[in-house]
Amino acid sequence: MNKILVTGGAGFIGSHFVKRILWADDITHVTVLDALTYAGHIENLGEAFLNPKLTFVHGNILDAELVDELVRDHTAIVHFAAESHVDRSFFAAGAFVQTNVLGTQKLADAAMRHGVEKFVHVSTDEVYGPLPEGSASEAAPLRPTVPYAASKAASDLVALSYFRTYDVPVCVTRSANNFGPYQHPEKIIPLFATRLLRGEKVTLHGQGQHVRNWLHVEDNCAGIELVLRHGAAGEVYNIGGGTDFTNKELTERLLGVVGADWGSVVYVPDRRSNDIRYSMTWAKLTALGFRPERDFDESLAETVDWYRRNPDRWAPLMRSSVTVRPHVAPDTIRESQHA
C-alpha cells in the first residue's frame, strides 16, 4: 500500500491529507486527481509540490478511461472527490448524483479490476440525518434529508457493495464538520470569518439553535490515515471527537476572535431542510487508537488568523475559473488527455 491515488486532493480536506501522507516514509508516491472545480485549488497543495513523490493530474473521476489508467498504477485509493455543499445541492441535485454516486462507482469498478489493497471512501455524518437526541453509531440507519446527504449515502452504499459483491477492500469514513485553513468561504466558519474581517454582517438561520460537531481538519485526516492503514475491509468508521456547538454558540466564538459584537449578526428565516442536530459515536475508531488532538478555541483562532493573513485566497468567488499553477517540475503535473 505504498502508492496512493487521492481523488479530490486539491480540495480542502483532501489537500490537508495529501500534505500529511506525503511525508510518511512507507509511502513512495502520491497521485492527486482533481477536476479543479470552484472548490478545488491547486494552490491548496502549495509546499506539497516540493516533495518529488507527488504527481498532480487534472481530470474528472467521471472519466472512466482516465480513472482506469490511474488506478492500475496504484495500490490504494483515498476518495475525497465530491460535490459537497448542501445549498448547491438544492439547485443542482443531478450534478451531485453524477459526481458522488456514479463517480464512486467508476472508481470502485477500477479498484475491482486492478486489485487495490485498500479503498477508503470519505463521507459525512449528514447521511444519518437529524438526531434531536442520542448519537448515531456506524450501524445506525441512513436517513438523509437533502440531495447532498442522499448522494453521499448512496455513494457509501455503492462503495460497500463492491466489498460485499467483489471483495474490494473498501472502508468508509464519516466525519463531523471540519474546519481549518484553505476551506472555501461558502462554509460557515470561513464565510463568517471573512465577512466579519471585512466589517460585514453575518446571518444566522432561525434562532441559531442547530447543533454541529466541529473537528479540526488535521484530526479528521489523522482518522482517515488510521483507517487507510488499519481499518478492516467492509467497515464504516465515524470520525468524531470534536466539539458540539449550536450555530449561535459558534458565532459567539467567531465574534470574539475577530473582535466584533452581536450588532454584526442578522437573524434570517431558516433554510429548507435544515437538520436540527447531527451526532455520532466513534468508539470503533478509538479502538484503533484515534485521539483528536486539536483544541477548538486555539484552532479557531489560528484558522481566522489564516484568513486574515491571506485575503487573496478568499476574495469574492476566490478565483476565476482558470487556476494559476505554481512553478513545479514538468513531470509532476499533467493534463488528462481524456477530454
Image (spheres, rainbow, N blue to C red):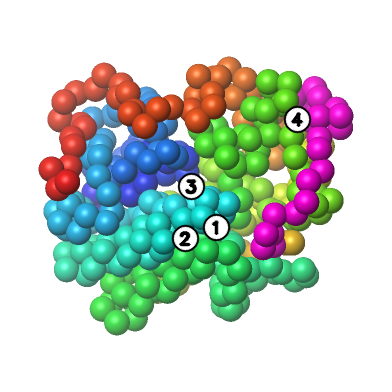
Residue at image position (15%, 56%) is 65
Residue type of the residue flagged with mark 3: Cys
On the image, the x and y values in percent for residue 318 come to: 48, 28
Name the one closer to the observer, 74 or 10: 10
Look at mark 4 in the image and give the residue it sits on: 201
Whether pointer 2 and pointer 1 mark residues with C-beta atoms closer than 8 Å, the reply is yes
Q: Is residue 91 left or right of residue 244?
A: left
Look at mark 3 in the image and give the residue it sits on: 221
Name the one closer to the observer, 281 or 202: 202
- The CA distance from mark 3 to mark 2 is 27 Å
Eye-nearest disc, 3 or 1 = 1
For label 3, the SS is helix
On the image, the x and y values in percent for residue 317 come to: 50, 30
- The CA distance from mark 3 to mark 1 is 28 Å
Residue type of the residue flagged with mark 4: Lys
Look at mark 1 in the image and give the residue it sits on: 90
